[in-house]
Image (cartoon, helix red, strand yellow):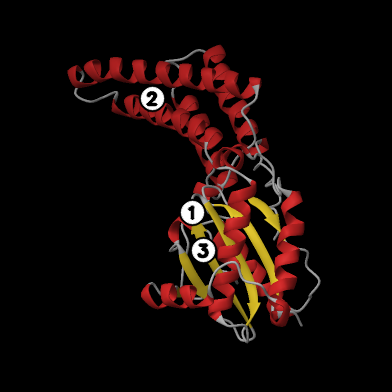
Amino acid sequence: MSLILFAFVVRVRDGLPLSASTDFEHNRELHERKQQLKTISKALTLFPERGTVKGHELNIYFITSEGVSYMTICSSGFPTTMAFCFLEDLRWEFTAAFDSTTVALASRPYSFLEFDGVIQKMKHQYSNCNSLSLSMSLMDIQEDLRARPPEILNLEEMVLSNGTANGHTEPVSGAGSNQRLEPVTTLGILSLVLNIMCAALNLIRGVHLIEYTFQDDNEGIWNVIAFLVAFACCLCQCCLYLFYTPSKKLKSFIVLTFIVVCNIFLFGLRNIWQLIFHIAVASLSTYLILTRKLQEKTNDCGV
């Protein structure tokens, strides 16, 4: 088995893969380490500039400089000094080939495929230590590591931001704040406008009745409550349509039921056509809430 199994260059600000070595090895631990590598690459701003993740047979090493991170998976028998020397050489080669503007403008994964060959060549050189010709002195690297030792990370105990879990756990799909709904349609915009109009009508009628209710010794208090409940339910329908929420189906039917009951209770204060209008708007909104699905997630670029 090679001493350096995988090398990876990634942009720090968004975890965009820029270049990677060819992968010839396939085993369970390597797959786990590559999953951890992907986890780290998506949250590099949370990690130190230089770090190590220890494994049973394979270790991860990485360094970050000028908005780019250089990462590698090596055999546990490969000296740490050599691993960081490899990453430093990789950094020098990459910065010599691509300036910061080119890196910043990269818009698609693995934009620098031409650098893959350079990584592969360096991997081969470092894996065959007898033929190795280092561009940096190992003694200098040892002194630097002694002065600023890399942080040893334990991804099993770390929980990353934005709902991203550690290297063995996938992000939770039910987290409401991370879910994206399909774009709002023209019919959806119309239903929002009609719902807001219904909410305004309910609020105006409810507030107007409050004055007469107090004058008549609270005889019309239930009418006021019905108008205000209908007003609140119209706003709830707007929120249910615009934002993801768990148990959306149950909540939308409960809100629709309240709107129907309130409008039936107000029969007499509203004519039949007004009731039909309010119930029809609420029914349309419920239909759109139930048919607006979660947006399909694009597959993450694997490493």
Residue 289: give x, y in percent of width and height.
60, 35
Neighbour tally class for label 3: few under 14, some 14-19, many 20 plus, Cα within 10 Å: many
Front-most of 156 and 250? 156
What's under tag 3, amino acid-wise? Ile
Residue located at (72% from left, 53% from top): 115
Residue 273 can be seen, yes or no: yes
At which x and y percent is residue 170?
Answer: 61, 64
Mark 1 or mark 3, whichever is nearer to me: 3
Name the quadrant of the N terminus: bottom right
Dot label at residue 27: none
Classify 296 as above or below 117: above
Query: What residue did someone put label 2 on?
Result: 227
- Element on which disc 2 rests: helix
Tell me the CA gap for discs 1 and 2.
40 Å
Specify whether residue 267 is in view.
no
Query: Which of the two discs, 1 and 2, sits closer to the camera?
Result: 1
The residue lying at 58 percent from left, 77 percent from top is 82
- Left or right for 207, reference 193: left
Please say if 302 is above or below 279: below
- Within the image, what quadrant is residue 252 found in? top right
Image coordinates for residue 7, horizontal then vertical, percent: 67, 65
Q: In the image, what residue type sits under mark 2?
A: Phe
Tell whether label 3 touches label 1 (CB within 8 Å). no
* Figure quadrant of residue 69: bottom right
Q: Say whether disc 1 or disc 3 marks the residue closer to the N-terminus.
A: 3
| Residue wearing tag 1 | 162
Secondary structure state at the residue bearing disc 1 = loop
Left or right: where does residue 265 sit relative to residue 212?
right
Residue mark closest to the camera, 3 vs 2: 3
Q: Residue at x 75, y 72 (%)?
A: 124
Q: Residue furthest right?
A: 24
Residue drawn at x 56%, y 37% is 101
